Image (spheres, rainbow, N blue to C red):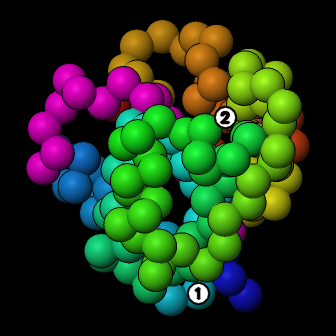
Amino acid sequence: MALTVAITGTRSTGHRELAWYTELFAQFLGAFAGNQAHFHIGGAKGIDSLSLLWLAENSKARVTIVAPGTVAQQPAEARQAIQCCRERIAEIVELGAAELGTPAYHARNRWMVDRSDMVIGFPLDGPEGTSGTWQTLNYSAQQGKPRLIVPV
């Protein structure tokens, strides 16, 4: 049976070098990225785009991109990563939110968690906060789903 994993994480990734994220993903995504794995990724910049690029290059896992509105509404960095990896993306889900704001992002995050067996979260290092990453991790806990929390 294939394991389905939602990835959530900070959009603020400029404080680390790309090589650092490459090693981090090899360690924490690589363990789950076998041929039978399926990842749900939010399609934003930061961890979403970096994890998409890593999975496309280093695994045969299925990838679903989930946008709260449309991919065209995503930041340029995210659109570029999606375009670059298009051949490796199994599905793009556009939830069609009329307005992109906190409710739309929370709905996207719940959509991913509801369809996943576990969540891997990459929040900014520090105390638990109210970010979308922590909202997603806490929602997964409420749903009784395993969480792997890897601070960046």
**Where is 78 relative to 86, above or below?**
above
Q: Name the residue beneath numbered marker 2.
A: 137
Mark 1 vs mark 2, CA separation in Å? 23 Å
Q: Amino acid at mark 1?
A: Gln
Q: Residue at x 46, y 60 (%)?
A: 82
Q: Amino acid at mark 2?
A: Leu
Residue 89, quarter of the rendered image:
bottom right
Assess whether residue 62 is covered by the magenta stretch. Answer: no
Dot 1 and dot 2 residues touching (CB under 8 Å):
no
Q: Is residue 20 left or right of residue 6?
A: left
Q: Which residues are magenta?
A: 4-19
Residue toward you, 121 or 72: 72
**Where is 125 relative to 47, above or below?**
above
- Image quadrant in which the C terminus is located: top left
Residue toward you, 57 or 94: 94
Q: Residue at x 58, y 11 (%)?
A: 129
Q: Residue at x 72, y 26 (%)?
A: 100
Residue toward you, 33 or 17: 17
Q: Is residue 149 visible?
A: no
Q: Is residue 68 left or right of residue 81?
A: right
Residue 90 position in % (x across, y down): 61, 78
- Image quadrant in which the N terminus is located: bottom right
Q: Residue at x 30, y 30 (%)?
A: 13
Q: Which mark is residue 36?
A: 1
Callout 2: 10 Å neighbours few (<14), some, many (20+)?
A: many
The residue at the far front in this view is 72
**Where is 150 relative to 11, above or below?**
below
Residue 66 position in % (x across, y down): 68, 53
Residue 32 position in % (x across, y down): 49, 70
Q: Which mark is residue 86?
A: none
Q: Which is nearer the N-term, disc 1 or disc 2?
A: 1
Local secondary structure at mark 2: helix
